Amino acid sequence: MFAEDETQLLIAAARTPADLAAMADRRAAGLPLEQVIGWAEFCGLRIAVAPGVFVPRRRTEFLVRRAVALATGEGAPAGPLVVVDLCCGTGAVGAALAASLHSANVDAEVYASDVDPAAVACARRNLEAAGGHVYQGDLYAPLPAALRSRVTLLAANVPYIPTGQIALLPAEARLHEPRVALDGGADGLDVLRRVAAAAPEWLAPGGHLLTETSERQAPRAAEIMAGSGLAAQVATSDELSATVVTGTRPAPR
């Protein structure tokens, strides 16, 4: 984004000249623009973002597109869908899925969870107005037990940066976003292992687990999903420089 564009966003967000000066100072100090103005654009939505919370990335819109295609394309399940946004952060993925499915005239129940209290507060602002349900806790632990074996779309935008590469991230992410939202362990796939291991207990037959990875990690991520009994596929978007791995729970024959 050009400096002129940032300036216009700061001016639009400021209520008073003093607000504008304070916001400009925070931006100059290195805070992500989205945390300064209080929102990020994601899939055409304005997503509330608070200081210290992971900022939704545009590349993650590819995950949303893939999930919507699975929910609305040939062979899509009939009846209301159950959607879970795991490691939800601001709830951007859940909110975008809710909006996209509504536009496609698909009924969906949307649930989300995250371990970070600040992220959960943002997610509630972004999801509860649309009828979503947000829980605080580790991965599946806070979700209602009644969702087991009922989840149609399980979107898990897990942290996938290898621990040794955290220090190489831009300062905006390294200093102003929670490490728990970035650090995926030694190879970046530790959280995905936990998500994939339990996914068959939560997915409905024919349900899908979708996660974002780097292109380099994708083959190993697909192996992890296959090891949990899911049929794995890798898709990439050159436009968004994004890679999504999808694991599908086999449906009974």
Image (cartoon, grey):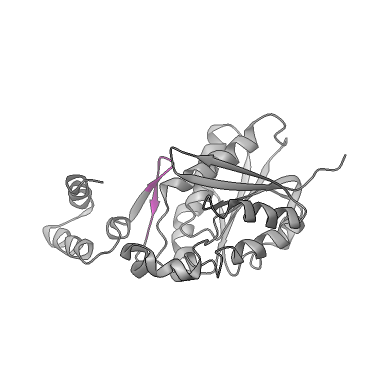
Q: Is residue 207 magenta?
A: no
- Count of numbered marks: 0
Give the magenta range.
Answer: 41-49
Q: Is residue 122 visible?
A: yes
The quadrant in which residue 177 appears is bottom left
Name the quadrant of the C terminus.
top right
Q: Tell me residue 6's x, y (percent).
A: 22, 49
- Is 243 placed above or below 196 here? above
**Residue located at (66% from left, 68% from top):** 141
* Residue 148 visible in the displayed image: no
**Observer-nearest of 138 and 211:** 211
Q: Position of residue 10 (x, y in %)?
A: 21, 52
Q: Is residue 182 above or below residue 47?
A: below
Q: In percent of the image, x 11 and y 58: which residue is there? A: 17
Q: Nearer the viewer, residue 119 or 133?
A: 119
Residue 47 included in the magenta stretch of the image: yes
State the residue in front, 124 or 230. Answer: 230
Left or right of residue 27: residue 166: right
When asked about the image quadrant of residue 170, the answer is: bottom left
Residue ranking furthest to the top: 74
Q: Main secondary structure of the magenta part?
A: strand
Q: Residue furthest left?
A: 17
Q: Residue at x 59, y 51 (%)?
A: 218
Identify the residue shown where x is 32% and y is 63%. Answer: 172
- The picture places residue 184, in percent across and down from the top left corner, at 54, 66
> Could you tell me residue 82's position as x and y percent?
66, 47
148 to the left or right of 115: right
